[in-house]
Image: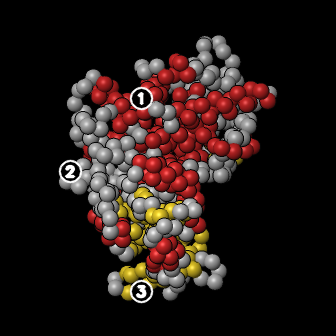
Amino acid sequence: MHGMDCFMVHRFCSLFDSSFSQCFIAHPTRIFVYGLCITKTKLCLYRYDRCGILYSDWVNYREKHAHELVRALLIISSPDPAMLGFDETVVINKAGKHVFSMEQDGKLVKLTEVSLEWNCLSLTGRSTTCWKVINEDTKKGFLLKQQFVNIQRTPEHELLEEVKGIKGIVKVHFAQRIGKLMSELRGTIPPNFHDRFLYRMVVEEYGKSIKCVTDVLLLIKAMRDVITGIAQGGLYQQEVLHRDISANNILYAKDPKNLRKDEGYGNLIDFELSINPDRTTSLDGKDFRTGTHAFHSIRVLRSDPKTYHPGYLDDLESFFWVLVWILIRLFYPIDNTDEKRTKDSLKAQQKVLDKFEDLPSMAADWKRGFLAQCSDQFILNFIGSECDLEVVDFVEHLGAFFLQFVRLAEKRLPIPDDANDHYKGVISLFDTAIDNLERAQSAPGLVANLNAASTHAPPPASIQVEAPAIAVTQPQAKKGRSTKVMSEPRRSPRLQAGSSSTSQPTQTSSDDFDRPA
């Protein structure tokens, strides 16, 4: 193809990318979409799929090759849905809902869409889409997950086969690979082509993400159950890394007051990015910082993928950053004495949350500073006076736990490879925090609703949680800490001696906080 023709194709493609993204958004089960670029004298036929774009040479249909115009029009207007990229295992019912036909143990199962839970907006890649569905025969609800999986990855249900029945780990009912490989559908394969296949998996239906906090005690229980599930399932012993520990990938139980078999208060989902670094087909070097950037460990953010291979401690540390991120969203100190100061506090809160999404080196330095703050018991500048003292102490101890490994890495000293003890240590900290919170909440007359007790203004819509009502309790007396009721601001450890105990915690400047200890 001539240079000018290539330029025209790429220009058309860039103009039409958003249009074809909308085609896939409107029809998430579609495998590919045709398009036709046509001028007064030439035409170019192209096709988008989840691996990229495939296009023809420019054809002059005016001077010759008129039959190519007819052929192109017949292709894009074919009466055969499969020829247009539609998946024939899916139909649309009269209510406009998808009906999926799948096989389970050799039997046909029909699953009808209840609602679309997640739809990927990207044009290429895994394009994960999730629906709530109901089995037409049993009337039981499930979550159906669809992806276009790279052939070098192990399908998610195979990774989870070894941890069936483990509390806190997503329960897979069945899965199926649909249709042909993308390479077989294309016929023409470019160099360095990343082949994919359509894959659907049916899993247990759970509740909302843990970022939708209604009770801090339930939040901590949910995270404890997930970490315990990983430990009991022996995932770290099999060297299986999740690599995408995030707030969205930990779901509450469907009904926390009535747990089902093998269901935890929290349940870890989305093992799609999991890898075993020892496998010959592992992609850990190619997509080193895959997953949710905000929750990456400090060592992953600082390291070179050519020399560093993530380990179980990186997954474990990600849980800590999920907890901190959620608590900052809930309890960042907001001074609402006047409108201007409230706005300034909300801006400062968003600035802190943005640190999680910063460039890897800057995010790592910020997190390193936060761990130092945990060690020095100064985190009340970021998790304010409305948070239970038991929770603040828990975060401080958990942060100090991870700081020891960061310091060893900074000194280039070997880190003890004792996953069993490390998981036990973290779980013990969670159990202690849960016991302390339960004892505090069991004290009569000391449980208050956050909406009534809080003097904070609500967070802005961009960071607002769905249910801000949280049980806030009278903390136990601790050495060096105020024991005032939670409706009153608690004294910050940063305040000088003689300062008023009702003063708001002082806010650390970004310059001070970003400096590694």
At label 1, counting other C-alpha atoms closer than 10 Å, the crowd grade (few under 14, some 14-19, many 20 or more) is: some
At 42% from the left edge and 80% from the top edge, which residue is drawn?
102
For mark 3, does the 10 Å Cα neighbourhood hold few (<14), some (14 to 19), or many (20 or more) residues? few
**Residue at which label 2 appears:** 278
Disc 2 residue crowd, few under 14, some 14–19, many 20+, Cα 10 Å: few
Number of numbered tags placed on the structure image:
3
In the rendered structure, the answer to whether residue 413 lies left or right of residue 502 reads left
Q: Which mark is residue 108?
A: 3
Q: Earlier in the sequence, mark 1 or mark 3?
A: 3
Label 1 – label 2 distance at C-alpha: 27 Å
Marks 1/2 in contact by CB < 8 Å: the verdict is no
Q: Position of residue 410 (x, y in %)?
A: 31, 24
Q: Quadrant for residue 147, please give it.
A: bottom left
Residue 401 appears anywhere in the view: no
Q: Is residue 7 left or right of residue 343?
A: left
Q: What SS does tag 1 mark?
A: helix
Which quadrant is home to the N terminus?
bottom left
Q: Name the residue nearer the viewer: 431 or 439.
A: 431
**Residue 362 percent location from the top left of the image:** 46, 28
Q: Secondary structure at mark 3?
A: strand
Q: Amino acid at mark 1?
A: Ser
Q: Nearer the viewer, residue 132 or 470?
A: 132
In percent of the image, x 52 and y 74: which residue is there?
73
Where in the figure is residue 486, as x and y percent of width and height? 66, 36
The relative height of residue 108 versus residue 29 in the rendered view (above or below) is below
Question: 339 or 403: which is nearer to us?
Answer: 339
Q: Is residue 30 above or below residue 373?
A: below
Q: Which residue is mark 1?
A: 361
> Quarter-wise, where is residue 508 in the image?
top right
Marks 1 and 3 close (CB-CB < 8 Å): no
Q: Earlier in the sequence, mark 1 or mark 2?
A: 2
